[in-house]
Amino acid sequence: MFKKILIANRGEIACRVIRTAKKLGIKTVAVYSDADRDALHVRQADEAMHIGPAPSSQSYIVIDRILEAIRKTGADAVHPGYGFLSENAAFAEALEQEGVAFIGPPVKAIEAMGDKITSKKLAAEAGVSTVPGHMGLIEDADEAVRIASQIGYPVMIKASAGGGGKGMRIAWNDAEAREGFQSSKNEAKSSFGDDRIFIEKFVTQPRHIEIQVLGDKHGNILYLGERECSIQRRNQKVIEEAPSPFLDEATRKAMGEQAVALSRAVGYFSAGTVEFIVDGDRNFYFLEMNTRLQVEHPVTELITGIDLVEEMIRVAAGEKLRIAQGDVRLNGWAIESRLYAEDPYRNFLPSIGRLTRYRPPAEGRSDDDTIIRNDTGVFEGGEISMHYDPMIAKLCAWALDRLGAIDAMGRALDDFEVEGIGHNLPFLSAVMDQQRFRDGRLTTAYIAEEFPDGFSGVTAGERQARRLAAVATFIHLRLARRAAQISGVLANHPRSIGADWVATVADHEFALAVTEGAASDTIAFADGESVAVSSDWMPGSTHAAFVVDGEVMGVKVTLNGSSMRLRWRGIDAKAYVRSPRVAELARLMPVKLPPDTSKMLLCPMPGVVTSIAVQEGDEVQEGQALATVEAMKMENVLRAEKAGKVSRVAVEPGASLAVDELILEFE
């Protein structure tokens, strides 16, 4: 077995590998850039080596710098994680020449499967069902348009060396094919140093389902079931689960056997994933093979009980697999939610900054026999950098059945506290409560179909608002009773706390009366409904569990003068609890309108302006590209929302902007 493993990665996956290495008694080496000097993976490893500036192109994907770190630390094996150099055949070959074990597949398998064009040809030869497309390289945008027209729209434009949703565009017409080709090419070159592009037919109403494979160096290969990864945004997975709610046993077996056949055809060993597109009739088509550990591997671990990182290490050390195909059992259901540093209220644009609060839910098995797991690479007070992917953590929930796992995930999301940056916790919570998701009616277009106008938060229904009104009233009265106990008041002049109140939550208003009890308060609404409320919430607590009429609610609480902000199940509501007279007067207060920014183009996220497509005095039309801002390795084209004339260009290409900084003004 290895004595010391260098992890050629950062963040969450580096911490994940360190955890298993410690379990096996193996020393670990972390590498870090300037931006990651104080990162969690650096703190957790036994040793750490600096490898260069913040941009990954100058640090994490520079092979010579990783090799130098290996030589200095004496590591005898390298785990590449995912992304960066994990599917770089030249890196694996360099390690082989260095006499250092690569904890991953053989070089030939990486070369064959890492190139999507070659992999599709090999898949077809191995008897794996493939999607129609053009497997040759495409030289320019004109050729891309011609090929796309021949295949038939819609088409998927993809980077040959791509992954993680980067370098991918869907085109529905010639104009989108032309623009998508160039954007994919730029992203591919920036992210992978390889700008080769190919095109294939885009299957409408598809599901994205992948098979986890595991092989050793002795010719043993098996599959560990599937993962449903259909909840995606911009080709980036957001929510995954295992098993899939759509597959039957026959389809699962057929997909698994084809995945194994493809793996065997390229002499594969280690962990890998064969991805398929599945249509509504359970016809499946090979998409690509990822010759590495997947981001979403925890859900497979939770339903199989197999530590995939441990198996990768053992296989790299020459050991045989300790299980056979017949030993694989899928137990229960697991769901993973990716917590991203992106603002769902601004079309999920990246967000950077300091994590002023980071409190994940408690991990482990609960009294209801559910399991919560949180894989992360950040900590409270840490910085989310613009140089890397925006993932903060992967929150996983396991239960005996799918609805149990969904409910456990909903509660865990309620209990997850993140402050200081924009994040997608409210969006994830919203999905968990959607009936379509709970029914398992998923496609890769789920987010676009369910949130066609973007995400603007969950609007509290009448029942939800009542529950939050009860919580707000409980908090208000606990504060009032605490204030009434202040020392120094005149004798025989205690502060009187009334029983009648008016609670306002968002657009809902409730008249209610409160009866204080020893263990809980009873809140009687004007229409006759009564609920008992109890909690251990104390002033200063930013989160607490409230039991409202027997329902446990994990609510985030922020006090702000006379109001309070309550967040629960994707709802972000301002609440007031007033006396009836004050409530009557409050209804007469005018509503303050937000400032008018309709004649401005503001930067929607922190990033770098890579291009300005217009000049002062230009007439622009609706939908016209105005500027491009790059953040977290993704290009974002900003377009005109309506026709107008540019009166001022406020910045130049290369400028680094914060959220809402001015880019253009219009007459």
Image (cartoon, grey):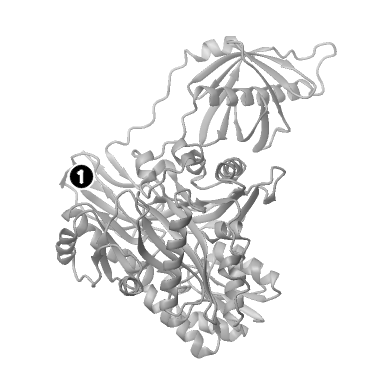
Image quarter of residue 274: bottom left
Left or right of 529: which side holds 573?
Answer: left
Q: Name the residue: 60% across, 75% down.
A: 321
Q: Nearer the viewer, residue 658 or 249?
A: 249
Return the x and y of residue 580 as percentages of the image width and height: 59, 10
Work out which residue is located at the far right of the displayed protein and give it.
491
Residue 380 seen from this side: no
Q: Name the image quarter holding the C terminus.
A: top left
* Above or below for 599 versus 191: above
Tell me if mark 1 has few (under 14), some (14-19) or many (20+) residues whose alpha carbon lies within 10 angstroms of its own: many
Q: Which of 587 and 125 is in front in this view?
A: 125
Q: Which of 4 and 485 is in front in this view?
A: 4
What amino acid is labelled 1 in the image? Val
Left or right of 520: which side holds 345?
Answer: left
* Above or below for 195 versus 627: below
Q: Name the residue: 36% across, 61% down.
A: 166
The secondary structure type at the circle numbered 1 is strand
* Above or below for 295 versus 533: below
Return the x and y of residue 391 as percentages of the image width and height: 50, 56
Residue 289 seen from this side: yes
Q: Name the image quarter holding the N terminus.
A: bottom right
Return the x and y of residue 355 as percentages of the image width and height: 57, 51
Q: Name the residue: 46% across, 58% down.
A: 252
Find disc 1 in the rendering and name its residue.
646
Return the x and y of residue 200 as percentages of the image width and height: 26, 62
* Above or below for 594 versus 19: above
